[in-house]
């Protein structure tokens, strides 16, 4: 019955669920050593929205030297006569790109990178 339910889920709703994604779900999520179905009791997608709220005003700390800043972007309007609207994203977190690249190349998997161009 479990396999039937899994295949039914894959074939319902979005058509973007591939066999590879379903294999990933089974192997890396459902069969993971630390996966416990009991943790899903009372789960709702709305629970995920609760994670976005910061009602307590607590500061979230990010590891590995993440930077927090406010970012302002210009959003174009439909009219060419009207100036773009500015929108500010508060407490935006990012990691400097050079540090990300440095971390990638010092990782043990870096020896598997293909760095030579080809035609």
Image: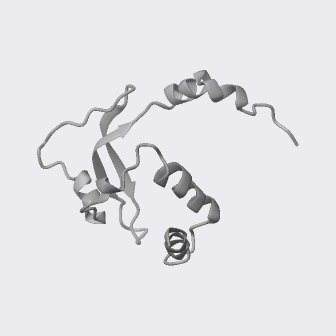
Query: What is the quadrant of the C terminus in the image?
Result: top right
Q: Residue at x 59, y 24 (%)?
A: 107
Taking the view exactly as shown, the residue that stands out farthest to the right is 119
Question: Where 113 sits versus 29, above or below?
Answer: above
Vertical side of 29 occupied by 61: above or below = above
Q: Residue lying at the far left in this picture: please name it.
A: 56
Q: Is residue 4 left or right of residue 74?
A: right
Residue 15 occupies quadrant: bottom right
Q: Residue at x 36, y 60 (%)?
A: 84
**Placement of 71 over or under 108, stated as above or below:** below
> In the figure, is residue 88 to the left or right of 78?
left
Task: Give percent across and percent down for residue 13.
Answer: 49, 77
Location of residue 117 (image quadrant)? top right
- Tell me how the rendering is colored: one colour
The percent coordinates of residue 87 (x first, y second) are 30, 54
Residue at the (56%, 23%) spot, across then down: 102
Image position, residue 91 (x, y; %): 27, 41
How far across and down, in percent of the image, does residue 110 sit?
A: 66, 27
């Amino acid at each position: 019955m479990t396999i039937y339910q899994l295949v039914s889920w894959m074939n319902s709703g979005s058509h973007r669920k591939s066999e590879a994604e379903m294999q990933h779900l089974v192997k890396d999520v459902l069969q993971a050593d630390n996966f416990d179905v009991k943790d899903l009791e009372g789960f709702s997608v709305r629970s995920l929205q609760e994670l976005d709220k910061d009602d307590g005003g607590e500061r979230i700390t990010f590891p590995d030297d993440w930077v927090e800043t406010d970012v302002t972007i210009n959003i174009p309007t439909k009219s060419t006569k009207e100036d773009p609207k500015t929108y500010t994203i508060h407490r935006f977190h990012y990691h400097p790109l050079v540090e990300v690249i440095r971390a990638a190349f010092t990782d043990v998997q870096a020896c598997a990178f293909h760095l030579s161009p080809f035609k």
